[in-house]
Image (spheres, rainbow, N blue to C red):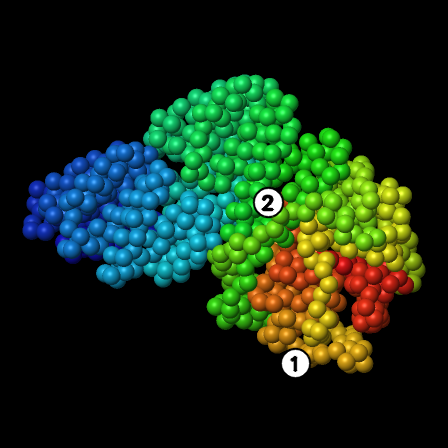
Amino acid sequence: MSRAADLYAAGVAANEDMRPAAGARLLRAALRALGDPAQDRDGEQNLRGRVSVSLAMAEAEAGHLGAGLELLAAATDLLPPQERAIAHAQRAILLRRAGRDDESLAEYGVALATLDVQAQPVLVAKVLVNRAVVHMGAARLGPARADLDQCLALARREGAEVLVAKAVHDLGFLDYLSGDLPSALHRYVEAERLYEGLLPGILAMLGLDRGRVLVAAGLVTEAERELATAVESLRAQGSLQDAAEGELARAAAALLGGRPGDARRLARGARTVFLRRGNVRWAARAELMDLRGAAAQERRRYGTAARAEQLHQTLAALGMRDDARAAALVAARVHAAAGRPDEARRLLAATSIRGAGLEARLLQRAARADAAAAESLPRVAARERRRGLATLHRWRSRLGALDLQGGAALLGRELAGAGLADALATGRPAEVFAWAELARAQAMLTRPAVLGDEDDGAWRDLRALGVALARAELDGRPTAELRRRRARLGGELRRRTWAVPGTGVTQRPASLSRVQAALDGAALVVYVESAGVLRAIVATRSRARLVTLGLLVEAQEATARLRADLDVLAGGLPADVRAGVRAAGAADAAALSGRVLDPLLALVGDRHLVVVPTGGLLTVPWSALPATHGRPVTVAVSASSWLDRSGAGSPDRPSVLVAGPGTSRGEAEVVAIADLLRAARRPTTRLVAERATVDATRAALSGAGVVHAAAHGRHEADNPLFSSLELADGPLMGYDLLRLPHPPELVVLSCCDLGLHDTRPGDESLGTASALLASGSRTVIASVTRETDDAALPLMVDLHARLLAGERPASALAAAGSADATGFVCFGSG
């Protein structure tokens, strides 16, 4: 019997660790070790019943629900009366996994009625945590939270660490369903820490749930990476239901990312698995995702609308209220697109979104806008879209992390794109401007939370790994392990930043008239894109015009060519080669200017420029263009953010000068600028050589007026907030800048590439410059290309001399750089 007991314990552990195939093998072996049931001695019958209960779960996970239920039926008679609640609870789990939620709840009720909370607190806690999952599946969030709170209290009191971890995990999922994504991600960080030491097999399930949250936040790339890893692990573990749920989450990510064909393929594969398992509820949910993909591919087909209405009825009959509502709204949109507004209105009138989450509210606004457009009511359609985006913006303020805030733009991409397209059709600059401001860089109107120092030790470890990796590369030693450790720790730290709650501080986008009133002799150029066509609004204080320029992709390609030319020129080249590259650069600069600026010059005149780019135009090296060489240009991610930061700075704030290691000009540049500041009697902190540490620099930056940093820079395209400048003890990253309680007003980054940004939907940008601007800095001067020491040193000294003389940053940069084209750009307020 002892061997059977050992095998039973190992099988239970495998089940709990999400390895049902291994659990089934061990539990069958335990039954074989028990031998003939007719020969059971004292205690053996009870053990046989327990083994059968656990084996039932493993069989069901392998897709053999009938076999699992048969095992449970047989096990009930083998268990003593006080333990039969275990069989009822296990049957409830199997029924839930099969989508038979009402039967599952009934079984949980029987189990709880049988158990004594005083004598069997851990068993009660187990039943509660599992019943909460059923409640969450039916959107009964109040009962789910009550079950989980009671479970967590019991588990903590009894020291049941595994149950504590599961309750924390499920509370995170409940927060996700409630729309509180930072709280969900915070709980997942805690659950991950608990699981690593207790049940590492459940980390795949945690990855699935975290992937769902990232989809809800609009971080599609990150979500797809997390979900792909989770699905692979779940399949390897034999958790077929969870793996199929992961595929369905991947389908949602693909649909949000604009790939409806991939969404349909993934949804259909998941549906096949659900049907094979007899899970009609999840199969219906997969069909809904397939239908949403079909609607996105071809919204005018009547068959799609009919299928959506039928599915609405099916989902409603299954008690899946939220999914039924989504199906009705999809049907309404298809009817509206096909010119059947009466049918759309019929469905909208019958669909309530009371208590609905963000996705349903945005979908309803889109459906209402579509119906209004089908009835030739453009103002009503615009109003619905604006209200949807306002809802999204308020929700965004609950997110504290800058990349989460930016990712949220993807959720409103369709509303914003349709509104902008309609505004462009009117040809009225004020309307186009208003929609452009609603459609871009909304994260800059929502202050990110200041990251705390609770993970300071882990950030130090990450920097140390970066230093060790750089040394290993120089020494020619293997780097694979160091890269793996750095990637893992970096991922953990990024996930912790996602858990920071939002500030709730937001602003409304500015009107064109307000921005025009603040131009003060400058011209505003706002670039917009719709259906691949690039247009520009050109505004001065007295007038505004809308100009069509051509294809955006051609302007982006010309930008990339010019930046490549400038990068090559920054290297050491023979004179004849340099002359050839200069000629190519001049031709590329003229070509780019012809696509984005020359058609606007008659309207711009000789005015200073405030440029609001779109897409890859955020990295245009403006000083290299013929018409803007020597002309002050300020680049802002939105006109509203430019206006917000355009007030006068505080002249009494101290200056900070930092020189990183390994640059031939760093200390010389800092010394020369320090001499200028000393002559002007400006209080200055100078950090060079071993004094230029990350901690010292962060401390000096907080509350500073003008900051100048001369160091090697590195732009990380995969995660731009890990972009960094190298200091004495390692990299100062974008995340470090988001930890500043009082960001500096003007930052000059005399470093290569730190003006580069990762541009996401909605023209949300991520990078070192955007981290500073989002946290409150007024202006950042940084380069979008590589720079030579010979050119950068005199330019930087001249720049600071002009700043001390009272010139605005954009004017000072333009005058200082008039001798030669550079990649330095003035971002922010100018």
Q: Is residue 402 left or right of residue 173?
A: right
**Vertical placement of residue 465 versus 171, above or below:** below
The N terminus, quarter of image: bottom left
Q: Nearer the viewer, mark 2 or mark 1?
A: 2
Residue at 84% over, 53% down: 521
**Vertical placement of residue 419 versus 440, above or below:** above
The picture places residue 219, in percent across and down from the top left corner, at 55, 47
| Residue 35 visible somewhere in the drawing | no
Q: Which residue is mark 2?
A: 409
Q: Amino acid at mark 2?
A: Ala
| Residue 418 visible somewhere in the drawing | yes
The picture places residue 595, in percent across and down from the top left corner, at 83, 42
Give the quarter of the image for residue 667: bottom right
The picture places residue 663, in percent across and down from the top left corner, at 74, 73
Crowding at dot 2, Cα within 10 Å, few <14 / some 14-19 / many 20+, comes out as many
Residue at 69% over, 61% down: 778
Q: Helix or strand or loop: what does disc 2 sit on?
A: helix
Q: Amino acid at mark 1?
A: Glu
Disc on the earlier residue, 2 or 1 = 2
Residue at 27% over, 60% down: 156
Query: Disc count in the image?
Result: 2
- Foreground residue among 309 and 46: 309
The residues bearing labels 2 and 1 have C-alpha atoms spaced at a distance of 42 Å
Q: Which residue is mark 1?
A: 690
